[in-house]
Image (spheres, rainbow, N blue to C red):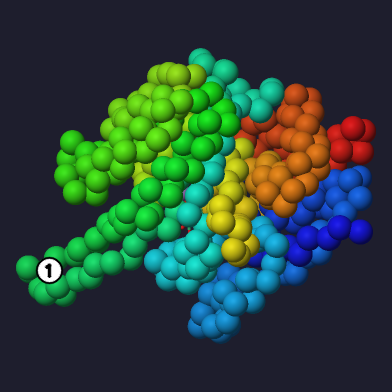
Amino acid sequence: MRSHRIALIPGDGIGPNVVEAAFKVGEAVAAKEGFTLEPTYFPWSCEFYAETGAMMPEDGIETLRGFDAILLGAVGWPASVPDSVSLHGLLLPIRKAFVQYANVRPHRLLPGVEGPLKAESFDILCIRENTEGEYSGAGGRVHQGGRDEVAVETAIFTRTGVERILRYGFEQARLRSGRLASVTKSNAQKHSMVFWDEITRELAEEYSDVEVTSYHIDAMAARMVMAPQSLDVVVASNLFGDILTDLGAAIQGGLGFAASANIDPTRSGPSMFEPVHGSAPDIADKGIANPLATIWSLAMMLDHLGEGEASARVMRAMEAATRGGIGVRPGSDTTGAIADAVLNAIERD
Ligand code: NAD
Ligand code: IPM
Ligand code: MN
């Protein structure tokens, strides 16, 4: 029987709840389609940090290398470990080490979900650069503690990094409507963002069948609220993509619905699938975290693993659940009830 080895990193806060719910859905759909998902759990989290002094073991990346995919819940518990330590100790190194340079985040309304906007028919695919840019970690502090103290955060954009994410965006646009929106802030950031715009224009000649439009990040934020239906594939840098995808989550009804895939398109190592949201300390232990974002991420994982029919089954089951009014409003149903509704829909399908 076909089998896929999955590394599960539930993480902190609501992470374990949503991963448990999603993995059950994965196992159910695998049984229907005649393959297995072989899970290995890694307890890497802020609790693990409290016990060991690190977010993952020294050989953590090497351990993950042998898996077909990684499913992650959420990382971060700022009350006990500073976010700059926890995220730079686990999530961000995984994205970088496995060169998961394309962070793919779909934004559309599931049936029955009422977003905050009048527009109901948008279908946006955000492609976020995921390995460099504003997240390079370069910089430092000078004159620390003094009156002249300066903090420098250097955004690093390489030709390789910018070109490959833009190419990914152009390719996705080709598979969809043929329209690509590229997001920068080249009116203010005259080095990196002008560079990004230049490379966009170079590639536009090669992809002459794709209609590419450049937007500034501020105008794009407004457009996503005022005219989301005018957008299709949107490609942006690491930080701009981070911000736009929480906005994307908001217009699709909340963070409980927003899925993401951290993809290495070369497939030389595992890709990682996780919801856009974090550990949600404000609702952790209440049992009301919406697992749909993680279930949708699992569907993206199945698709990446070549299990397209299983992926489609998960999407159909999620849609059947929300069409029936389950999980459509924040806090209206428990994590377990939403997962059960999806599982029932899989059984009935
Ligand atoms: P968050 O995404 O955890 O929460 C923001 C708001 O959305 C909260 O009100 C929360 O209750 C709500 N929310 C999030 N997910 C939900 C769900 N599935 N169902 C219902 N409501 C949901 O963002 P934050 O509060 O800024 O961050 C909390 C911690 O998570 C921090 O440590 C942060 O760094 C970390 N974080 C991690 C990831 C990740 O692991 N990928 C992503 C974002 C934030
Ligand atoms: C996300 C998160 C992370 C990011 C944080 C937790 C470092 O916000 O996945 O969107 O900024 O990439
Ligand atoms: Mn984010």
Which is more toward the observer, 143 or 166? 166
The residue under label 1 is: 149
Amino acid on which the number 1 mark rests in the picture: Glu
Q: Residue at x 22, y 39 (%)?
A: 186
Q: Which residue is drawn at 52% across and 57% down?
A: 100
Residue 23, position in %: x, y? 77, 54
Which is more toward the observer, 270 or 217? 270
Residue 157, position in %: x, y? 30, 55
Dot 1: within a 10 Å radius of its alpha carbon, few (fewer than 14), some, or many (20 or more) residues? few
Relative to 167, does residue 120 appear above or below in the rendering? Answer: above
Q: In which quarter of the image is the N terminus?
A: bottom right
Residue 216 sits in which quadrant? top left
Q: In which quarter of the image is the C terminus?
A: top right
Whether disc 1's CB lies below 8 Å from ligand 2 is answered no
Residue 279 visible here: no
Residue 258 sits in which quadrant? top right
Residue 95 visible here: yes
Determine the residue located farthest toward the left in the rendered image. Answer: 148
Determine the residue located farthest toward the front in the rendered image. Answer: 206
Relative to 95, does residue 30 appear above or below in the rendering? Answer: above
Relative to 228, does residue 280 appear above or below in the rendering? Answer: below
Q: How many marks on residues?
A: 1
